[in-house]
Amino acid sequence: MVEWLQFALRAWDRRGVGIRPADFLERLVIDSADTARVESGFGAPRVRLLSLSMEDFAQVDTTQDAGAKSEAFAAALHEGLLRAADWLARQPATVFEELRASGRVTDVIVGGWITQDQFDLDLPPEFLRACGALGLSISVCTND
């Protein structure tokens, strides 16, 4: 079972050279109504596109359907990825092209925690198209 998943847009340098906010984060279009949020802290500069935890669905009634929580999680994941795709589609491609031209890596990192050795992750084509249009690879890392 998936305990939580987080999708984040990031830019990083394989040599460990820092990326100035003016070269990445400050060039992105982030509206107050967007669910995308700049994350602060250690590591590569990033924008949280989506964060879901199974705890968010604790109130879901499972008396009629034992899988209702998982279904609600999957539906929220799908809707969240569609919102992320819309947000990504509004971003200037030149930001990512210029970062890559200067040797930086741009991607979407999917982090998560699972309590079993398998999980299904369905990525909507709209999300994949938006990532592809910006040249973003998708990396998945669970239980790190």
Image (tube, rainbow, N blue to C red):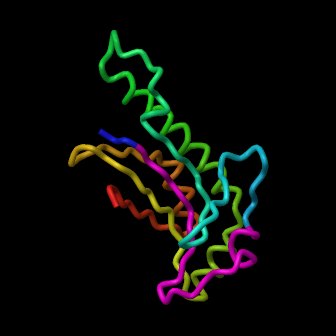
Q: Is residue 125 toward the left or the right of residue 99 in the image?
A: left
Q: Nearer the viewer, residue 73 or 18?
A: 18
Quadrant where the N terminus sits is top left
Quadrant where the C terminus sits is bottom left
Q: Residue furthest front?
A: 41
Does 87 sit above or below residue 82?
Answer: below
Q: Is 24 inside the magenta-drawn segment?
A: yes
Task: Examine the image and state in which quarter residue 25 appears.
Answer: bottom right
Q: Residue furthest top?
A: 64
Q: Residue furthest right?
A: 32
Does 30 sit above or below residue 58?
Answer: below
Q: Nearer the viewer, residue 40 or 52?
A: 40
Location of residue 7 in the rendering, given as x and y in whole percent from the top left corner:
50, 54
Q: Nearer the viewer, residue 46 or 124?
A: 46
Q: Is residue 29 toward the left or the right of residue 131 in the image?
A: right
> Residue placed at 57% from the left, 43% from the top?
82
> Residue placed at 47% from the left, 85% from the top?
14
Task: Examine the image and state in which quarter residue 48 appears.
Answer: bottom right
Location of residue 138 in the rendering, given as x and y in whole percent from the top left corner:
44, 63
Location of residue 63 in the rendering, given as x and y in whole percent from the top left corner:
34, 11
**Which residues lie in the magenta part?**
4-27
